[in-house]
Structure formats: C-alpha cells, structure tokens
Image (tube, rainbow, N blue to C red):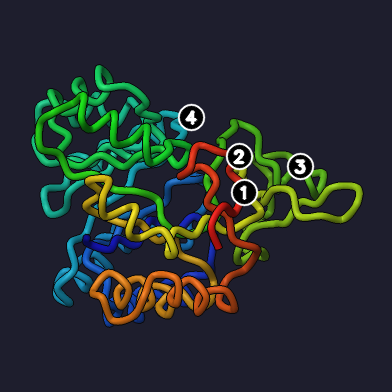
Amino acid sequence: MKLALGPLLYYWPRQRTLDFYREVAAAPVDIVYLGETVCSRRHELRLPDWLDIGEQLTAAGKEVVLSSQTLIESESDLKTLRRIVEQARFRVEANDMAAVHLLAGSAGWVAGPSLNVFNPQTLALLVELGARRFVAAPEVSGDALSQLLAAHGEPLECEVFAYGRLPLAYSARCFTARHFNLQKDACEFRCIAFEDGLPLTTREGRPFLTINGIQTQSARIHNLLADLPALAGARVDVLRISPQAHHTAEIITLFADAVAGRGTARAAFDASRPLMTGEACNGFWYGRAGLDQTIA
C-alpha cells in the first residue's frame, strides 16, 4: 500500500506552511495532496505558491495532486477552480461536482472523499468521466467498501482516510467566525489562531466536535494503524494521513514501518497514541458509530 498526505485542512501562517512541506519532502510518503479545500478566504498561500511547493515535492520523488475546494460559493471560487483544472503539471482531486464537470473527459483525476460515493453506479459514472483513483468517504465501512469495489469490478485505485480528524460536514456558514460573533466576510481570519481547529465540548466538558471554519470535524482522531491487516485485505491501495500541527512526520513513519513489516500494526498504533491530539476512534471502518474504538 502507498501512503498519501491529504491536503492541509487548517489555516497556518505562510512560513509555517512552507516549513511543513519542506519536512514532508523528506518523509516516507508517496503522494502529497496540496491546496486549499476548506475556505477561499484563506490567502496565506495562493495557487502559484502551491504549484511551487508541488515542484519541490516532485523533485523529492513525490506524486503531487492538487485538491479543489469542497464548497464552491462564488465566481471567484470558480475562477480558481478553472485555473487548477487547466494547469497541466499535476493531477487534480475533485472535491465537488463543479470540479468533476470541468475535469470530465480528461483521464487520471482523483475522485475526492467529499463526493460521497456510496454505490457502484456513482463510482462507474466517475470512472467513465475519467477518474482513476477513488477516495472513499470516511463513513464507508470496510465491508461496504469491499462490496462497492466488487460490484464495480474494473481495476481502480482505492484510497482510504486512515488518520486524522474526520471531516464530517461543510456549511456556507463559518462556525469559527460565529464563535467570535463575527460575520463570515469579516471573520478577521480567526482560524489562523487554531492550529488543529477549535475544540467544541458538551455541557459536561467532554470533547464533542472540532470547528474548522466552515468545516465540522470529529473531536477524536480516526486512526486505522491497528487495522492495517484488515485494510490490506480490502483492496485498499492508498492510505491517507491528514496533516496535524505537530508530529505528522512521525505518524507517517509509523505507517510506513507498519506497511513495510518493520514491526506490528498494533505496536505502531500504541506508539502513535502520545503523538495524537485526541483520543483514537475507528468505528466507521467497522460499521459502527464513528467515535467508537472497536479494537485497541
């Protein structure tokens, strides 16, 4: 199985982001997804910057994929999307149907997780339009994924979200701005103060969700390190690791060692616990509530 680093979901300062991807260049990851997928108001880096980072990562031997924005809300968003699709250097991950429409007929693009593919008919349509890699929605269980791929029948690269806060939902409203009683268009870019999102707790003080601008994430960290044997038997080709503010390179190394057989999956999972920003969960993979931890 290959390892992929998903797009950066948080808003970090420019220099910190550049430093992060310099570190990624030396990490044992095969594929790196780049670009802003959450909010078009985040302008520390723009498309030319992502293209420059892509060139540096390509020189380091990585496959680079440009990820499109998940929620397109304006003509400005469409203009950026068109520029992403029209560049010929890197593959594109389509994260909404506007991107699919623009990519239709070109071969080799990636069907992103927010396209919410749950049946073989939808998967077949995306493949007919040119998709050559399919990223399963995080809610899809291992059994459901195996059935989906078996029903599709044709060879297709399959990628699974294997580590990180689960991206659960997107909204036209910015929840981070609302938290500070600000309008979305005058948000003061408050997201930049929360390197791993803004924790949301219940009245009892228990972790509940994570707010990340217009994106709602899980409070727990989806971690399939202990479940690598099951993933290997489910026709999974690529494991996606979502960036976090600290220890991303160490997490990647644990996955790489476990995939290569340099230690057991359970030992790798145990080693990842102190590197995580929350409690672990893997319930979705087993068809249970996402916040469940069903094995370890």
Q: Secondary structure at mark 2?
A: loop
Q: Secondary structure at mark 3?
A: helix
List the residue tagged with mark 3. 178
List the residue tagged with mark 1. 292
Q: Amino acid at mark 4?
A: Glu
Q: Image point 49% across, 45% down: which residue?
A: 38
Image marks 2 and 1: residues in contact by CB distance under 8 Å: yes
88 left or right, relative to 180? left
Q: Amino acid at mark 3?
A: Arg
**Of pointers 1 and 4, the one earlier in the residue sequence:** 4
Q: Nearer the viewer, residue 7 or 261?
A: 261
Q: Amino acid at mark 1?
A: Asp
Q: Position of residue 164 (x, y in %)?
A: 50, 58
| Mark drawn on residue 108 | none
List the residue tagged with mark 2. 289
List the residue tagged with mark 4. 73
